[in-house]
Image (tube, rainbow, N blue to C red):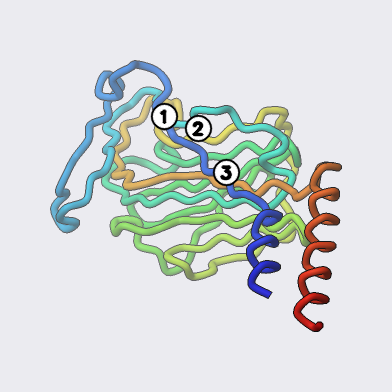
Amino acid sequence: MRYMICFLFLFLPAVAAAEIVHVGANNPADEGWYLSMGVPGYAGDGCWITETSGYSKWQPSVPLSAADFAGDWFLIADVRWLAGPKGESRVTLFDGYHGKSASFTWDDTNAYFYQAGTGDTILPGVDPTLRHEYRVDYTAADSLMTISVDGVSKMVLEEYQQNDVSAYLFYWGDNNSQAYSKMEWYGVGFNATPAAIPEPTAFVLLAIALVGIVAYAWRRSR
């Protein structure tokens, strides 16, 4: 039995974590960012703080593709609002596979989830002046998108709102306009679980393994 369990792990779908890099100046500080360690109230933690009125962003080092959206995926951001109007600091995902987009945004009173065609929806019971973990989980099997904060579900959407999106893009940072904004960004990420499509060689290996398991069981029974 233990051999079968070990073998099955070879066929579990891999989770690809996207490395996040700054886009623009080599030094993010040139675009109004600075790295803070030991932020008051969060001793020992480091965060990137954006204090800018221009356009600066971070995104995966390897561009996203249709394969990243063909299966399940989740988007996560750990942030705290400091100053600025709604929409000037946000985390945005453009899903060209489904032709849709989604994002989080904040102001001094509320955190919001944004969809093209619907606009901003307030996330109830969330104080944006406190640090929270914002997350979107998409399940390809039922096309459901669950929006949660600190692990608590706030809404479940049966589908995206349609948007004219051809790109596969994920970024976080300033929203490319003139107003001043300031946010603490503790962490951000995008993980995709590609749809499992075994290659022909995988079927061969599977057949060999099954024969071996049957033979092993037969020998044990004698």
First in residue order: circle 3 vs circle 2: 3
**Quadrant of the image containing the N terminus:** bottom right
Asked where in the image residue 32 lies, by quadrant, the reply is: top left
How many C-alpha atoms fall within 10 Å of the one at disc 3: few (<14), some, or many (≥20)? Answer: few
Q: Is any part of residue 119 visible from this angle?
A: no
Q: Nearer the viewer, residue 93 or 121?
A: 93
- The residue at 78%/67% (across/down) is 213
Near-viewer residue (167 or 10): 10
Determine which residue is flagged by label 1: 21
Q: Which element is circle 1 on?
A: strand
From the image, tell me which residue sits under label 2.
60
Three-letter residue code for mark 3: Ala
Q: Label 3: which residue? A: 16
Residue 114 horizontal/vertical position (percent): 57, 48
Q: Quadrant of the C terminus?
A: bottom right
Q: Position of residue 72 (x, y in %)?
A: 67, 53
Q: Which image quadrant is residue 173 in?
A: top left
Residue 106 position in % (x across, y down): 41, 48
Between disc 3 and disc 1, whose residue precedes?
3
Three-letter amino acid code of the residue under disc 2: Pro
**Left/right of residue 58 with respect to residue 108 in the rendered view:** right
The answer to the question of whether label 1 and label 2 lie on touching residues, with beta carbons closer than 8 A, is: yes
> Can the viewer see residue 1 in this picture?
yes
Q: Are marks 3 and 2 in contact (CB under 8 Å)?
A: no
Query: Looking at the picture, which amino acid does disc 1 mark?
Result: Val
Label 1: few (<14), some or many (≥20) within 10 Å? Answer: few
